Image (cartoon, rainbow, N blue to C red):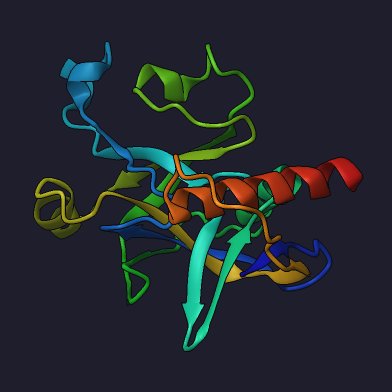
Amino acid sequence: MRIVELILDEESELGIEAISVVENPAIEEDFVALKSQEFKLAEIDGERRILMGALLIPNKPIYRRNGEDEYYIYFSKDTVLKASQMYLMNSKQNNSTLEHQYELEGLSLVESWIVEDKVHDKSVKYGMDLPLGSWVGSVKVNNDKIWKEFVQTKKIRGFSIEGYFADKMEMERPKEPIDEGLSKEDLMVQEIINIIKESENNG
């Protein structure tokens, strides 16, 4: 199966256009809905209505299907960093959608950072175990309908980015004997991770 690395060209029009709130995020990381009780200023701020979660995770294989064509995509640490910076530099922080279909008003990215420490990163405080180089964000929800009908009912559980990227490379999955202790799906994911690591070491 093909493995495609997606990249950004800082001089082109490529990049992330919006953050979508979705029920099933492709990166398989749910966000954490933050409420006022978790902060010292709770009595002053009331309910904060902030969603925190992973926006992009480096080197994570993401399955894609286009008709009969099945393949995996992934983003390197460098691309994740560039994407996070370009999103803010291009003033896209107020762009949001619901399930990549409907434009939303009242959602804004108010915090954005790259995980650099597995112990002391802010995401750890909220129970997230993310790889180094992950892009994490906090989105303020000033949209009553979205908060009450989608967040509180858990109809949306995470973030999914939408934008335009270029393909850097395509590689065929190596043919190796199947380990009986792993499912074919688990083995495929492990092989993809190994290929990605090898390409980074050789790059």
Residue in front for this viewpoint, 185 or 79: 185
- Could you tell me which residue is drawn at 39 percent across and 48 percent down? 28
| Whole-percent x, y for residue 91 in the image | 59, 57
Report the label total. 0
Residue 171 shown left or right of residue 40 in the figure? right
Residue 179 shown left or right of residue 50 in the figure? right
Residue 59 shown left or right of residue 197 in the figure? left
- Could you tell me which residue is drawn at 74 percent across and 62 percent down? 8
| Whole-percent x, y for residue 124 in the image | 43, 20
Looking at the rendered image, the quarter that the N terminus falls into is: bottom right
Residue in front for this viewpoint, 107 or 179: 179
| Whole-percent x, y for residue 196 in the image | 72, 49
Residue placed furthest toward the right = 202
| Whole-percent x, y for residue 82 in the image | 72, 50
- Could you tell me which residue is drawn at 68 percent across and 63 percent down? 173
Q: Is residue 133 above or below residue 193?
A: above
Residue in front for this viewpoint, 203 or 16: 203
Report whether residue 81 is seen.
no
- Could you tell me which residue is drawn at 27 percent across and 16 percent down? 39
Q: In this view, does 196 lie above or below 36?
A: below
Residue in front for this viewpoint, 121 or 112: 121
Report whether residue 4 is seen.
yes
